[in-house]
Structures are given as C-alpha cells and as structure tokens.
Image (cartoon, grey):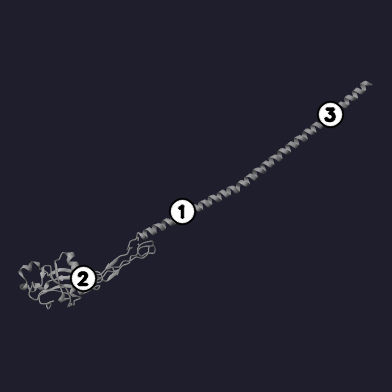
Amino acid sequence: MKRKYGLILLILCLALGLCLCGCGKVSTSQAQQYLDGENDVSAEETETAAADTESAAEPAANSAETTDTASDTAADTSNGSAAAAAAGTAAGSAGSGGTSSGSSGGSGSSSVSGNGSSGGGTSSGGSGGSSSSSGGGSQSSTSSAPQCTIAIDCKTILSNPEKLKSEKKSYVPSDGVILKTTTVTFKDGDTVFDVLKKVTRDNGIHLEFKSAPAYGGSYVNGIANLYEFDCGNESGWEYCVNDWYPNYACDNYKLENGDVIKWRYTCATGRDL
C-alpha cells in the first residue's frame, strides 16, 4: 500500500514538474517577445527623433542660407553705392578742377578794353566745377575802376627845327613821341593833371609846372626837358581831351571813363596842332 502511494506521489511530482517547466517556457517566451517589442518601439522612437532633428535642422540651414544671401545682397548694394559715390566724387573733382574757364574748379575771367569799357567774361566748367557750373556757383570779375588813355608828343618841333634852341635838340625823339598811348586807371574825381603826374612819374619823364592863378590853376611849362619858348615865341605845351582843347587849367578838368588825353607841343600857339 505504501508503495502504491509512493508511486502516485511520484507521478504527481512528475506531473507538477512538467507543468512548471511548461509555464516557465511560456513565461520566458512572453518575456522575450515583450523585450523585442520594447526594443522595436525604442528604435522607432529613435528614428522618429532623428527625423524630427533633421526637420528642425533644415529650417536652420535655410535660415542660414537666407542670411548669407541677404549678406551678399547687402554687400553688393554697398559696393554699388560705394562705386557710385566714388564715381560721383570723381566727376565732382573733375568739374571743380575744371578751370576757371572750363569749373572752381575753379574762377572767372575778365577782360578790360583800352578805352576803359569793361567786359566781363564768365567761366564755365563741368558739373561740380568751377566758376560757372552746375556744381560750383557762377563767378565773374569786371573791372569797375574808370580808365583813360594818355599820350605825349612834340612832333611839331620836327617841322620847325630852325626854331629849336640848339641845346634842346638832344631831347627831341626822332619820331617826336615822348610817351606812346598808355592806358591809365584813375579814381573818381581825378583830373588831367593827376594822370599826367602819374604817368610821368611811373615812366621817369621829366615834368615841371607852376601855379598860375590867372590861368585858373596849375600851368605845365616843361615836359621831358622841353619848355615853352624852346622852339619860338609861340611855343609851349597844350592838352586836349577827346580832340577838344579846353581853355582852362588841366587840374580843373575832371576825367570820365574812356577819355583820351593828349599832351602836345605847339610851335604856333596851337594853330599847328
């Protein structure tokens, strides 16, 4: 009997062991499947995260490219502006360097005629330039001071050599011209006498005069060492303005712009002039 129960107990133990082994295998298989599933999920999550990272990186790269493009555009714009500014500066320098007559770079030109009428020339330059240009303001200079001309001669002596004192022959020029026509600038209110003193002083020509109340002022009795009465009893100096011979003293004749003065030696109280 005991033997029988022992055999049954052994069978039960074997059956129980077999059951436990089967359950263990099932559990082990399920555990392996669970682990494999977890690994797959982790791999998928890793791939998804990597894809998201790449997607995030693409806008950043696009943004960097946009920034580079904007920088290049700004650089090109800056270079273009700098080139345009340099070209404008060069054009302005060329215009201003342009001359007084061709842009102060320059300043205007002026010309004054011999009879005192003044002609003003304007200068024109390029743009940015000179005296009368789009870049530089206009400039002109005009002589405003009045002018006259004066000449001195003793040509009548050449026609009356027999009347001339012998000691005076060396003072008579071969052509009879003591001072060629000379342009003189004078001040308002100056007289014929003022201009005569100026030109004789400037040209080193002898001049002698005296006060003559009866004559109404100063009387010129000697120029270039030729005096009155050196070539006859009717000889001496007379002056004319614009071919008119005034009958009063030279320091009473006030000049006007453009007057033409002549001092002439006469051997016949002006009849030979």
**CB atoms of marks 2 and 1 within 8 Å:** no
Residue 27 percent coordinates (x, y): 79, 33
Residue under the image location 17 percent in, 65 percent down: 201
Figure check: 195 above or below 51: below
Report the side of 142 relative to 72 (left or right): left
Which of the 4 image quadrants contains residue 151?
bottom left
Figure check: 43 above or below 147: above
Which of the 4 image quadrants contains residue 139?
bottom left
Q: Around disc 1, counting alpha carbons within 10 Å, would you say few (fewer than 14), some (14 to 19), or many (20 or more)?
A: few
Residue under numbered circle 2: 149
Image quadrant holding the C terminus, namely bottom left
Task: List the single residue furthest toward the right.
Answer: 1
Q: CA distance from mark 1 to mark 3?
A: 90 Å
User: Mark 1 or 3 closer to N-term?
Assistant: 3
User: Mark 2 or 1 closer to N-term?
Assistant: 1
Residue 217 percent coordinates (x, y): 17, 74
Image quadrant holding the N terminus, namely top right
Report the side of 28 relative to 220 (left or right): right
Residue 50 percent coordinates (x, y): 64, 43
Q: Around disc 2, counting alpha carbons within 10 Å, would you say few (fewer than 14), some (14 to 19), or many (20 or more)?
A: many
User: Mark 3 or 2 closer to N-term?
Assistant: 3
Residue 3 percent coordinates (x, y): 92, 21
Q: Secondary structure at mark 2?
A: strand
Q: Secondary structure at mark 3?
A: helix
Q: Compare residues 206 and 27 and report the one nearer the observer.
A: 206
Figure check: 240 above or below 30: below
Q: Nearer the viewer, mark 1 or mark 3?
A: 1
Q: Nearer the viewer, mark 3 or mark 2?
A: 2
Kind of residue sitting beneath label 2: Thr
Residue under numbered circle 3: 18
Q: Which mark is residue 79?
A: 1
Kind of residue sitting beneath label 3: Leu
